[in-house]
Amino acid sequence: MKNKKSITLIAIAVLVMVVTAFVYSPSQAAVEAGRGVPPNKRSPQANAESMTMTITLSEQEAADLAAAIQEEYTAMNTYQAIMDELGEIQPFARIARSEQQHVNALIRVAERFGVEVPENAGEVAEIEWSTLEDACQLGVTFEQLDADLYDEILPNTTNPMLIRVYTNLQRASLEQHLPAFEACIP
């Protein structure tokens, strides 16, 4: 009987350790948080330094972020200009609102890292349209160019937050906006 209790207690202890290892790994949590080592293994000086350290963007990352904001402004302005001429039509109304959300996401990142946010100068794409079909084709072209921009700037980007935002915006262009514009071409 005593032997069964010991075996049961050992089995429970092993099970708790295994479950704990899967649920929480201090080393993995530290790596994901960018600290590299678990908090309990760091010196007090390292803890103080990490609290005061500010993450900054490289000059290239800051310039690319400003370019991405400007591109999203241009997309939003272009889609709004199409609606001003052709009326509040889909998919332009929905995608113009989405482009505003893209701008807002990029601005939040810029503000977080102290990057000067470019003003929306009201620039629109230099592609002519006169019909809904022309406008939809412009949307296809513009979304492909948008995705290409992120293909250009992602290789120069090391900041994980920027990588995540750029990847999400590129995915929205390719998987949501582009198919919507392709579908509106008769």
Image (cartoon, helix red, strand yellow):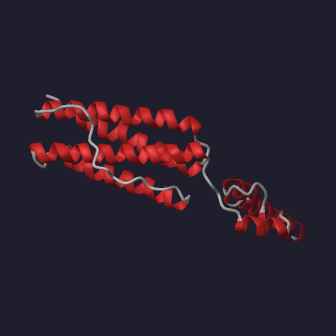
Q: Which one is in front, 67 or 96?
A: 67
Instruction: Pick the quarter of the image with the C terminus.
Output: top left
Q: Considering only vertical position in the picture, is 161 above or below 14?
A: above
Q: Position of residue 176 (x, y in %)?
A: 32, 41
Q: Which residue is at a point 24% across and 35% down the rendered structure image?
A: 181
Count of numbered labels shown in the rendering: 0
Relative vertical location of residue 138 with respect to residue 6 in this rendering, above or below: above
Closest to the observer: 117 or 20? 117
Residue plotted at (55% across, 52% down): 161
Q: Quadrant of residue 28?
A: bottom right
In this picture, residue 108 sits left or right of residue 73: right
Q: Position of residue 58 (x, y in %)?
A: 62, 47
Which residue of the protein is positioned furthest toward the right in this rendering?
Answer: 3
Would residue 38 appear left or right of 80 to someone viewing this image?
right
> Is residue 76 visible to us here?
yes
Please indicate, yes or no, whether residue 12 appears anywhere in the rendered image: no
Question: Toward which corner of the image does residue 18 lie, by quadrant?
Answer: bottom right
Quarter of the rendering occupied by the N terminus: bottom right
Indicate the position of residue 131 as horizontal and vertical percent values: 10, 33
Height in image: 79 above or below 17? above
User: Image point 32% across, 49% down: which residue?
Assistant: 99
Q: Position of residue 29 (x, y in %)?
A: 69, 58
Residue 56 lies in what quarter of the image? bottom right
